Amino acid sequence: MRYRQLLWRYKIKQSLSRKGNCWDNSPMERFFRSLKTEWIPTTGYRHLVEAQNHIGNYIFGVLLSGETASI
């Protein structure tokens, strides 16, 4: 299947940013960079449930603290 067909099939809206306009993705890129470099252990997780709980706590902690503007 083609890329756009898969997006349509799963009801995902494609980013419509202009070429070379990186600003709309920068908050998410910063968020995931912080998640990967500052939160996830370098040794990884032993179990999926442990990872889900740990990462979920990080995400909800950031959202509840109101730090989303600085990410």
Image (cartoon, rainbow, N blue to C red):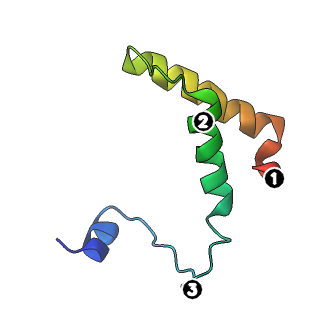
Image vertical order of residue 29 relative to residue 41, above or below: below
- Point out the tag, 1 or 2, that comes first from the N-terminus: 2
Residue most toward the bottom?
18
Query: Which residue occupies 53% across, 80% down?
Result: 16
Q: Position of residue 9 (x, y in %)?
A: 28, 66
Q: Which residue is mark 3?
A: 18
Give the quarter of the figure containing the N terminus.
Answer: bottom left
Q: Position of residue 65 (x, y in %)?
A: 82, 35
Question: Are there few (<14), some (14-19), or many (20+) residues within 10 Å of tag 1?
Answer: few
- The residue mark sitting in front, 3 or 2, is 2
- Point out the tag, 3 or 2, that comes first from the N-terminus: 3
Question: Which amino acid, mark 3?
Answer: Arg
The span from disc 1 to disc 2 (Cα, nearest Å) is 19 Å
Q: Which residue is mark 1?
A: 69
- The residue mark sitting in front, 1 or 2, is 2
Question: Which amino acid, mark 2?
Answer: Thr
Q: Position of residue 29 (x, y in %)?
A: 60, 55
| CB contact under 8 Å: marks 1 and 3 | no
The span from disc 3 to disc 2 (Cα, nearest Å) is 29 Å
Question: Which amino acid, mark 1?
Answer: Ala
Q: How many marks?
A: 3
**Residue 60: quarter of image:** top right
